[in-house]
């Protein structure tokens, strides 16, 4: 069955540090990948998505992610985090004929001043 | 997200009681979803509706029923609540299956005692 793994459950960084959150998926066919973010007390919102083409995708607020097919990975990056980036980040994959979006367990990011 | 409205936002139930979570959208999207979010487990799909008149099971459908009343509304019913159903429930919508881009409601926090 399709699954999405996020191995970093909690990450604490200082402002201006660089960020990389890991995401791996287990599916051999065509897969579409997403990162969602949930700020404290808010609903989830889309950060970025990959369907095809350039494997380096850019999203909102300076985030980017790189699709590496050989590694089944779609890691999220940001060169310099801000306190306002404190949130929970979810990787997700769309498979199964496009019917269902499978989420990872999430990574809680805390950015300290 | 004004496009997706969930009610109620908070509810406390006793074991065995029933209740219905309501979800309404004003974005005229075809597909609607119910997810539950639990700490350390990410979001898990309970049921979804690809279009008006159709519903399908997701990962964790046991103990729930759904109804796609019309294009705007998608309700989730707990017939006999159990403590294991204590969770935050999110309704989401998308233009159609295969897009992966979901718009979420603000969530409904349910506690079952």
Image: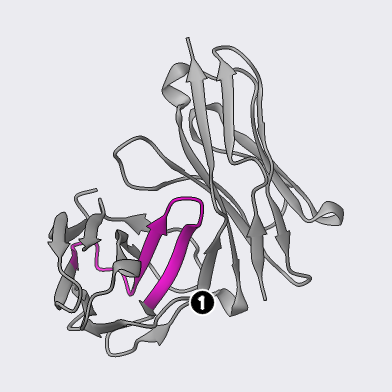
Q: Residue B63, position in %: x, y?
A: 32, 82
Q: Residue B74, position in %: x, y?
A: 23, 75
* Residue stretch in magenta: B23-47
Which residue is at 51% across, 51% downward? B40
Which residue is at 59% across, 30% downward? A11
Which residue is at 68% across, 65% downward? A31
Q: Secondary structure at mark 1?
A: loop
- Classify residue B49 as left or right of residue B40: left
Main SS class of the magenta portion in the image: strand
- Classify residue B66 as left or right of residue A52: left
Q: Residue B104, position in %: x, y?
A: 32, 55
- Classify residue B102 as left or right of residue A26: left
Q: Confirm whether the magenta stretch covers residue B25.
A: yes
Front residue (pair B93, B45):
B45
Q: Quadrant of the N terminus of chain A?
A: bottom right
Q: Which residue is mark 1?
A: A99
């Amino acid at each position: 069955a399709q699954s999405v793994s996020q191995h970093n459950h909690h990450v604490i960084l200082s402002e201006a540090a660089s960020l990389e959150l890991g995401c791996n998926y287990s599916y051999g066919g065509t897969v579409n990948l997403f990162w969602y973010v949930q700020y404290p007390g808010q609903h989830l919102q889309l950060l970025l998505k990959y369907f095809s083409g350039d494997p380096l995708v850019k999203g909102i607020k300076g985030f980017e992610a790189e699709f590496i097919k050989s590694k089944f990975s779609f890691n999220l990056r940001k060169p310099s985090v801000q306190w306002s980036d404190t949130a929970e980040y979810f990787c997700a994959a769309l498979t199964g004929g496009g019917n269902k979006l499978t989420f990872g367990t999430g990574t809680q990011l805390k950015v300290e001043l | 997200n004004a496009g997706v409205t969930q009610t109620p936002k908070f509810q406390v139930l006793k074991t065995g009681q029933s209740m219905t979570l309501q979800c309404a959208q004003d974005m005229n999207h075809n597909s609607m979803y119910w997810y539950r979010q639990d700490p350390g487990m990410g979001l898990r799909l309970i049921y979804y509706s690809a279009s008006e008149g159709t519903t399908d099971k997701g990962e964790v459908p046991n103990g729930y029923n759904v109804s796609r009343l019309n294009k705007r509304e998608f309700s989730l019913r707990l017939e006999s609540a159990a403590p294991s159903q204590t969770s935050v429930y999110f309704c989401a919508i998308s233009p159609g299956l295969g897009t992966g881009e979901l718009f979420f409601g603000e969530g409904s926090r349910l506690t079952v005692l």
